[in-house]
Amino acid sequence: MKRPHSHIGTIRQLEILLSVYKHGSITAAANVLHLSQPTLSMQLNKLSDSVGTALYSVVGKRIVFTEAGHETIKSAREIIDSLERLDMRISNLQDMKTGTLRLAAVTTAKYLAPHLIGDFVKEYPGISVDFKIGNRGQMIQTLSEGESDFFIFSHQPDEPDLILHRFAPNYLVPVVDQHHSFPSHKKMTIDEFAKEPFIARELGSGTQLAIDEHFKQLGIKPNIRMTVASNEAIKHFIMSGLGVSILPRHSLILGGALGLREIQVEHLPVEADWYLGYFKGRELSVVAQTFLDYALSQQQNAEIMLEPAFMHNEAK
């Protein structure tokens, strides 16, 4: 006997199934959904009963989905996506009174993004923000899975399907500790700078990729002393006298530069840009489109904010 479609589970049960599939275990899904494991298991059992067959089996500590399970997952995605599109259209009718802006950003964007987001939310106080920070690979995956509206990054990833919008400059500037012998008022040669012990970002960092490409074009090989996983750590290593580095200027202006100096070096700074990116074919909500328009309208302010400023006087 054919089962009526209205009896095939509830939206919540389908969301639970998708979460278990995504996270690979009932325990992980329960933690993410803030449910107890017994409650989550009970909902999955009810969904299996409504479908009329088992959706998965437990082998050791692994969940193995049946063919019926995979078919249900596929249909669940289509249903949830359809409801999200409906929700987007309803939100569009509410004239920006409510809504969520979802952003994914590389770690270095943590200095710049809060200022842009803060000004936007002041203008649209009914908008909430879901802001994720991680490495480039993680954030591109977040974007591709539809969990974010935009990806904020500097060094362009090898993703031909990304639509890119430049919204701010990203000047990568030479930095030394305040007691370094290099003067602030005189421009040093790139060779002099390259001979200094250099503190680099980790492999795969967008900042370091841009720096490496710049040095390669100049035919310069920096004297790399150590590799560090964050700009904040690099700042502290510079202050301790372990070497020099090249850092985003906004990390100094907005993230603090006590004990550091930006100096003048020929062929520097490295001139990069900040982008908002999203995948082709993605329908932007009114909230996302409004944020994009706002970010692009603020380009001149960003240029002024990130102008060269040798405000850190040479140590006396």
Image: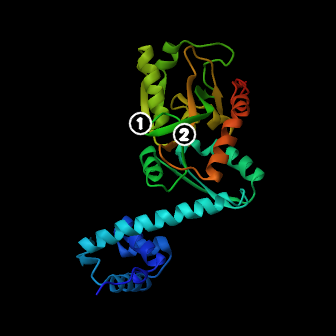
Residue that appears at 65% across and 61% down: 91
Work out which quarter of the rendered image holds the C terminus and state it.
top right
Task: Please indicate whether residue 118 sits to the left or right of residue 86 in the image.
Answer: right
Residue that appears at 37% across and 75% down: 26
Badge count: 2
Residue 286 in sight here: yes
In this view, the mark in front (1 or 2): 1
* Labels 1 and 2: the sequence-earlier one: 1
Work out which quarter of the rendered image holds the N terminus and state it.
bottom left
Task: Tell me, for residue 160, which label it has, or none.
Answer: 1
Q: Which residue is mark 2?
A: 231
Q: Position of residue 144 (x, y in %)?
A: 44, 50
Q: Secondary structure at mark 1?
A: loop
Task: Please indicate whether residue 73 sits to the left or right of residue 121 in the image.
Answer: left
> What colour-coding does the image apply?
rainbow
Q: Against 3, is 171 above or below?
A: above
Q: Amino acid at mark 1?
A: Pro
Residue at the far left: name it. Answer: 59
